[in-house]
Image (cartoon, rainbow, N blue to C red):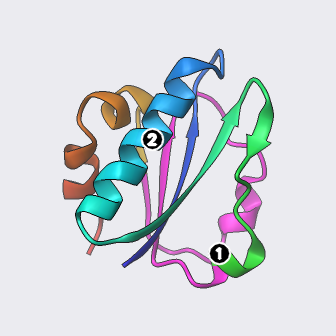
């Protein structure tokens, strides 16, 4: 499955990147093709491209704040929104919640 994810937290420092790393690691462990965009103190990093978005099956948003450029993902019908803390503490649970 091709999964895209966005992580963001209020301060945009540690938690944003910890969540991204954990989602990426768990996604690959489960055999998914996953790419994660971070929206932190440094702005948007690893920005998801139109090509990424066009081929995506699911979007995970692990955030405590509004996601910048959310309109880019209107074509993705399956979206899972979770707290950033869940992506940090229990990324397996995030993947268990994915819509089928």
Numbered circle sitting on residue 21: 2
Res 8 quadrant in image: top right
Relative vertical location of residue 54 with respect to residue 13 in this rendering, above or below = below
Name the one closer to the observer, 83 or 16.
16
Residue 60 visible, this angle: yes
Where does the magenta region start and end?
54-80
Query: Would you say 24 lies left or right of 16 here?
Result: left
Residue at mark 1: 52
Query: Would you say 54 lies left or right of 62 here?
Result: right
Relative vertical location of residue 37 with respect to residue 41 in this rendering, above or below = below
Q: Residues within 10 Å of mark 1 (few under 14, many from 20)?
A: some
Question: What residue is rendered at 50% in x and 75% in y?
Answer: 77
Name the one closer to the observer, 59 or 23.
23
Query: Would you say 73 lies left or right of 21 here?
Result: right
Which secondary structure, mark 1? helix
Question: What residue is rendered at 64% in x and 42% in y?
Answer: 38
Residue 64 visible, this angle: no
Query: Dividing the image into 4 quarters, which one contains the C terminus?
Result: bottom left
Query: Dividing the image into 4 quarters, which one contains the N terminus?
Result: bottom left
Res 78 quadrant in image: bottom left
């Amino acid at each position: 499955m091709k999964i895209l994810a966005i992580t963001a937290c209020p301060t945009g420092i540690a938690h944003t990147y910890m969540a991204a790393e954990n989602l990426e690691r768990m996604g690959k462990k489960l055999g998914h093709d996953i790419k994660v965009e971070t929206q932190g103190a440094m702005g948007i990093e690893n920005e998801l491209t139109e090509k990424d978005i066009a081929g995506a099956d699911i979007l995970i948003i692990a955030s405590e704040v509004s996601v910048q450029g959310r309109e880019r993902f209107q074509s993705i019908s399956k979206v899972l929104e979770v707290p950033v803390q869940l992506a940090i503490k229990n990324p397996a649970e995030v993947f268990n919640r994915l819509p089928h």
